[in-house]
Image (spheres, rainbow, N blue to C red):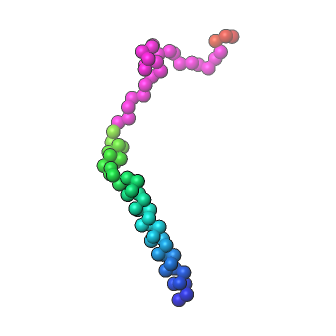
């Protein structure tokens, strides 16, 4: 029976913490847009840009790691 003297205040403290976390999340806007994050997974990723494509220059051949000054 004395364990209730510990468990009741502990459960009330957890309840207050959960309510505070919910109110904080609502004020920070966590629940403002519920549709867009679910639809983001369905969108295609953009094609990766090749080197030199952004500035209009021709793409250079890949570097093979060997020194050219040998």
> Residue 50 lies in what quarter of the image?
top left
Q: Is residue 48 above or below residue 63?
A: below
Asked whether, in this view, residue 6 is left or right of residue 22, the answer is: right
Image vertical order of residue 40 relative to residue 1, above or below: above
Coordinates of residue 65 in the picture (x, y in percent): 62, 20
Counting from the top left corner in percent of width and height, residue 43 is at 33, 39
Residue at point 44%, 71% (across, down): 15
Q: Give yes or no for residue 23 being in the magenta stretch.
A: no
Residue 62 % position (x, y): 53, 18
Q: Is residue 31 above or below residue 53?
A: below
Q: Is residue 25 found left or right of 13 in the rendered image?
A: left
Residue that protrudes farthest toward the right in the picture: 70
Judged by its main secondary structure, the magenta piece is: loop
- Hey, which quadrant is residue 45 in on the image? top left
* Magenta-colored stretch includes residue 54: yes
**Which span is picked out in magenta?**
44-67
x, y percent for residue 8: 49, 80
Screen quadrant of the C terminus: top right
């Amino acid at each position: 029976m004395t364990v209730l003297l510990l468990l009741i205040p502990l459960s009330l403290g957890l309840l207050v913490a959960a309510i505070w976390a919910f109110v904080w999340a609502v004020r920070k806007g966590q629940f403002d847009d519920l549709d867009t994050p679910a639809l983001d997974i369905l969108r295609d990723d953009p094609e990766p840009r090749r080197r030199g494509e952004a500035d209009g220059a021709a793409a250079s051949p890949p570097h093979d790691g060997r020194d050219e000054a040998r």
